[in-house]
Image (spheres, grey):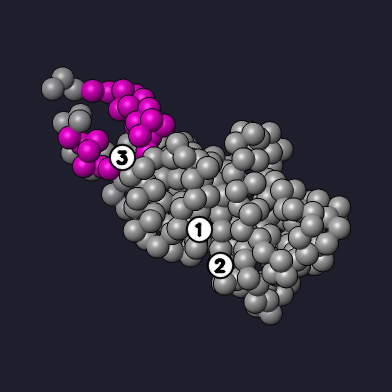
Amino acid sequence: MPETSPDERRSFILRHLQQKGRLTTASLAEVFGISEDSARRDFRELAGEGLIKRVHGAALPVSPAEQPFADRYRQSAGVKNRLAKQAALMVAAGQVVLFDGGTTNLAIAAQIPRSLAFTAITNSPQTALALSEHPHADVIVLGGHFDKRSRMMVGARVLDALREINADLCFFGLHSIDPEAGLTTSHYDEAALKRAMCEAASETVAVALAAKLGSAAAYKIGTAALLTTLVTEKEADPVLCASLSDCGVGLRLA
């Protein structure tokens, strides 16, 4: 095979990740007839620019949750509402429900039937405001430092409060999920917070666009098995869905 330039390999890597997801160093080496050390160097350089996420022996697409809150709120609003409506059906009367921050959980809160009586606990002031219009929701807001980027309350006080909670259900703000990389987030402080939310509920539910499956971010929250149920698009990659199911994640496709 004629020698290829780094730019050619770079274009191939980004295109492959966009279209098919995971790419291993062995596969890249085989396609271009290069050593695995060279393939790892290509991955390392792209990861250094924030264009991909490296995991053991492979590269994954960067999580779409890297975008600002306002941009994410506008993105795929119709699909998010459809998925949120499916997730909202999981709330039962009398339950204590934890709401993590994020645009999708805000959509779930808006979809919960107004005849349902339940208790909502959240670290998201926006979600609390949305639920203030619900006639039968008792709303508890977790106090702490307000993070302007994520529009959530974060920090030690939130973590301390979560240790005292035994919720029935947690709607978890999912940044990225992969069968091998697990649940990851783009921000260091959020990893411990999201893990504590999962641990404070009997069931953990995440709603995610298909693009978040098979992607990864910098900081690990835990294994995919932390999720009880994942609600995602019916167009999601069936191979990834099967792998997540093997990890113990229940799937609802909508």
Q: Nearer the viewer, residue 142 or 137?
A: 137
Q: Mark 1 points at which residue?
A: 229
**Res 23 label:** 3
**Res 203 label:** 2
Task: Give the farthest residue toward the bottom.
Answer: 164
Label 1 vs label 3, nearer the camera: 1
User: As displayed, is residue 133 above or below residue 144?
Assistant: above
Main secondary structure of the magenta stretch: helix
Q: Nearer the viewer, residue 216 or 98?
A: 98
Q: Which segment is the magenta one?
A: 4-30
Residue 245: x %, y % from top left: 38, 56
Task: Give the farthest residue toward the front.
Answer: 115
Per the model, the C-alpha gap separating discs 2 and 3 is 32 Å
Could you tell me which residue is drawn at 61 percent across and 58 percent down?
90
| Circle 1 SS class | strand
Mark 2, Cα crowd under 10 Å, few <14 / some 14-19 / many 20+, is some
Which quadrant of the view contains residue 179? bottom left
Marks 2 and 3 in Cβ contact (< 8 Å): no
Q: Which amino acid does label 1 sit on?
A: Thr
Could you tell me which residue is drawn at 65 percent across and 53 percent down?
88
